[in-house]
Image (cartoon, rainbow, N blue to C red):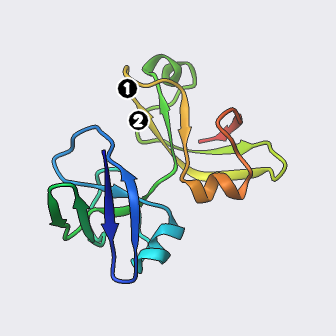
Amino acid sequence: ETVTIVGPKGSLEKVRVLGPVRKNTQVEISVTDCFKLGIKPVIRDSGQHEGTPGLQIAGPVGKVDLKAGVMVASRHIHLHSNDAKEWSLKDGDRVCVKVESQRPMVYEDVLIRVSDQYRKEMHLDLDEANAALINATSQGKLMGV
């Protein structure tokens, strides 16, 4: 399913609806998307809605006006608990990751998320990935906590 999100200065169509289901609706967009919508970019860890802007979500059966919940998601790494234990990391730690590419980059303040449901994977927004010419098979090196 897709929706249209509408801000004061523009809209984005065909925005995919993803899980998991949350207590409060959350919209994760890039800084570039914020500028297009006319919304102040606010970086937050997933689930932390305090001080975030809202927008309108238009879907096939109506519209919803969010008062808050629009954010640029913090860059983060999902780790299975076995990997976290092997690397001496815990949920909530922050690390640096160096990514080798045609435009190498070090990402600081990368949040660690640990769950038995996760597999090893780093999540960046499209702006961050494009800046370093990263693709789905790119790899990084953990630089430190």
Q: Tag 2: Cα neighbours inside 10 Å, few (<14), some, or many (≥20)?
A: some
Is 59 rendered above or below residue 111? below
Provide residue 139's location: percent of width, then percent of height: 71, 34
Residue 137 % position (x, y): 69, 32
The residue depicted at 54 percent of the width and 26 percent of the height is: 120
The quarter of the picture where the N terminus appears is top left
Tell us which disc is closer to us: 1 or 2. 1
* Tag 1: amino acid: Ser
**Is there any visible trace of residue 44 in the rendered image?**
no
Q: Is residue 38 left or right of residue 89?
A: left
Mark 2 residue element: loop
CB-based contact (under 8 Å), mark 1 and mark 2 = yes
Q: Quadrant of residue 92?
A: top left
Position of residue 45 in the picture relative to residue 54 (left or right): right
Residue under numbered circle 1: 115
Q: Which x, y percent locates residue 24?
A: 18, 53
Labels in figure, total? 2
**Foreground: 2 or 39?**
2
Residue at 44% across, 32% down: 90
Q: Amino acid at mark 2?
A: Asp
Give me the residue at 43% from left, 60% from top. 29
Q: Which residue is mark 2?
A: 91
